[in-house]
Amino acid sequence: MSYTLCLWDPSRPGTLPTTHRDADTICERLSAVSDRPTAKMIALVSALVTVAETRPTEEQARVGLEAYWGADPRVSLRANETAVFRLTIPSDDCIAQIAAVVSAGAKFGLVVYDDENGMCFLPDGTIFPESMREGWAFDLEELRAGPPDPHAPDGRTWLQRLAGELFDALGQGNRRS
């Protein structure tokens, strides 16, 4: 399965959306416009390659560029022939990739449109529709927090933990049919 993000340069007249519905209309219109990759798109793709190559954990470093992005973004951009660059990423747990694209898109002044759920990210940080902002903020917080610490205390006292472990041990094999 894959997930597609649509990106375009809003410097063309009439291509900066004002709503998520407007973004959908602009995306459709620009998809029919023949174009070559812009300097901003090339810079974005370079930044995305850097993101994949500088992932923090050893396990992530073993995963190749194609596995992280679904395909090499440089090859995808070279093959792109319209004013909308459709970046395809793996759909499994793709929040980190989407966040990286949104961040790089803002840095290089590009619109990022997620047509699967109707979210549009403008270069100035505006998100359409407004009803999705809170959910996006929550997703980003979870991403920044990282995985839970398995060694963190669970809030129970020593006696509560002991009682729980005894209950689990005594309860095993004592089920009636």
Image (cartoon, helix red, strand yellow):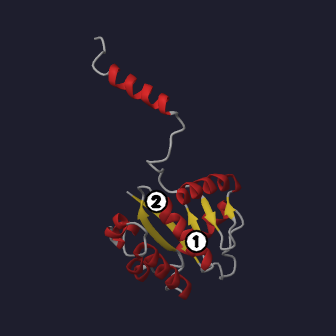
Q: Nearer the viewer, residue 93 or 149?
A: 149
Q: Nearer the viewer, residue 151 or 95?
A: 151
Q: Position of residue 75 (x, y in %)?
A: 38, 80
Residue pictured at 31% horizontal, 68% vertical: 62
What is the quadrant of residue 13 in the picture? bottom right
Q: Is residue 35 visible?
A: no
Q: Residue furthest front?
A: 158
Give the amino acid at mark 1.
Ser
Q: Residue furthest top?
A: 176
Q: Element under label 2?
A: loop
Tag on residue 165? none
Residue on which the image places disc 1: 103
Answer above or below: position of 137 versus 163. below
Residue pictured at 58% horizontal, 58% vertical: 140
Q: Element under label 1?
A: helix
Answer above or below: position of 6 versus 171. below
Q: Position of residue 76 (x, y in %)?
A: 40, 77
Give the amino acid at mark 2.
Cys
Image quarter hosting the N terminus: bottom left
Tally of numbered discs: 2
Q: Position of residue 27 (x, y in %)?
A: 58, 69
N-terminal of the pair, mark 1 or mark 2, is 2
Q: Nearer the viewer, residue 122 or 96?
A: 96
Residue on which the image places disc 2: 94
Q: Nearer the viewer, residue 77 or 160?
A: 160
Image quarter hosting the C terminus: top left
Q: Position of residue 160 (x, y in %)?
A: 49, 28
Question: Spatial distance from mark 1 to mark 2, Cα to Cα?
Answer: 14 Å
What is the quadrant of residue 14 in the picture? bottom right
